Image (tube, grey):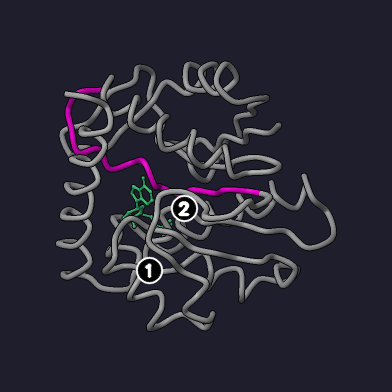
Amino acid sequence: MRDSFRALRFRRLIRNVYNKRFLKYGCQPHGVFWSDSGRQKSRFKIIKNQITALMPSGIVKIADIGCGYGSLADYMLKTPNCSRFIYTGYDINPTLIAACQEYSYLPSKSFAIGDCPMELVDFSVMSGTYNMAVTKDLMHWERYMFRCLAKCWDQSRIGMIFNVLVADKSHISEGMLYHCEVNKLRRRCVKQFGTTRIIRERSLPRDATLVVTR
Ligand SMILES: C[S@@+](CC[C@H](N)C(=O)[O-])C[C@H]1O[C@@H](n2cnc3c(N)ncnc32)[C@H](O)[C@@H]1O
């Protein structure tokens, strides 16, 4: 199967999985497969701190790719020093984008259906976006993920910041969660995109955040 057809198939499957979940739990971390709000926010904090370190002042344009029900937008509205962030959220799931447009404090034009920024931004950020695999084939999943990352990279002036679940050896778990050998992923990011750093935090032992810059 050609990569483009496979990508379409994966997107349809991803939409279905998240639709079912969101229908059951609604606008809360469980509704997008996070276990709790504390860890969801810890991931946002790491992303925010990395952006702040790279751009300590001035306006910052951010695209939140895989924005779910809009929790990062909400976090940024409530967090000091985030008023200089110009936020747009994208998700491949129309149900989730509709929820953002209905419940967020931001205007509805701040959210759109898509898998990459529609215009040039400073940073593309993705929290948990590629965690839920819809295939057991690791090679196909990683190829799909890099295809998505490349589209975001093209529209990111300074870089991309995204998190993944880590393991000693890359695999897709019984629960269909993608885990990766993070140094291998870093090497691939360096080869395909640019300088890549790995951020690890004690409070999130199974997570790594990759910061890819030009
Ligand atoms: C685990 S949820 C995280 C949602 C949000 N980032 C958060 O932390 O609350 C992953 C989200 O990414 C979306 N998604 C998955 N693959 C995507 C892709 N390639 N492009 C854009 N959104 C995607 C899903 O529809 C889902 O809303």
Q: Residue at x 57, y 16 (%)?
A: 191
Q: Position of residue 66 (x, y in %)?
A: 41, 54
Rendered image: mark on residue 165: none
Name the residue tied to disc 1: 69
> Residue 81: x, y in percent?
75, 68
Is 126 magenta? The answer is yes
Query: 116 or 134: which is nearer to us?
Result: 116
Taking the spot 55% from the left edge, 49% from the top edge, the residue there is 125
Q: Give the quadrant of residue 85.
A: bottom right
Q: Is residue 48 magenta?
A: no
Q: Amino acid at mark 2?
A: Ile
Element at label 1:
loop
Please tell me how crowded label 1 is: few (under 14), some (14-19), or many (20+) other residues with Cα within 10 Å: many
At x 65% / y 55%, what residue is drawn? 48
Residue stretch in magenta: 123-138
Q: How many residues crowd mark 2 within 10 Å: few (<14), some (14–19), many (20+)? A: many
Mark 2 vs ligand 1: CB below 8 Å: yes
Question: Total marks drawn?
Answer: 2
Name the element at disc 2.
strand
Q: Position of residue 116 (x, y in %)?
A: 47, 49
Query: Along the horizontal axis of the image, is 204 left or right of 130?
Result: right
Task: Give the numbered dot on residue 65.
Answer: 2
Quadrant housing residue 154: top right
Q: Label 1 CB, ligand 1: below 8 Å? A: yes
Question: Residues under labels 1 and 2: Cα distance?
Answer: 12 Å
Chief secondary structure of the magenta portion: loop
Q: Point out the image quarter for the C terminus.
A: top right
Quarter holding the N terminus is top left
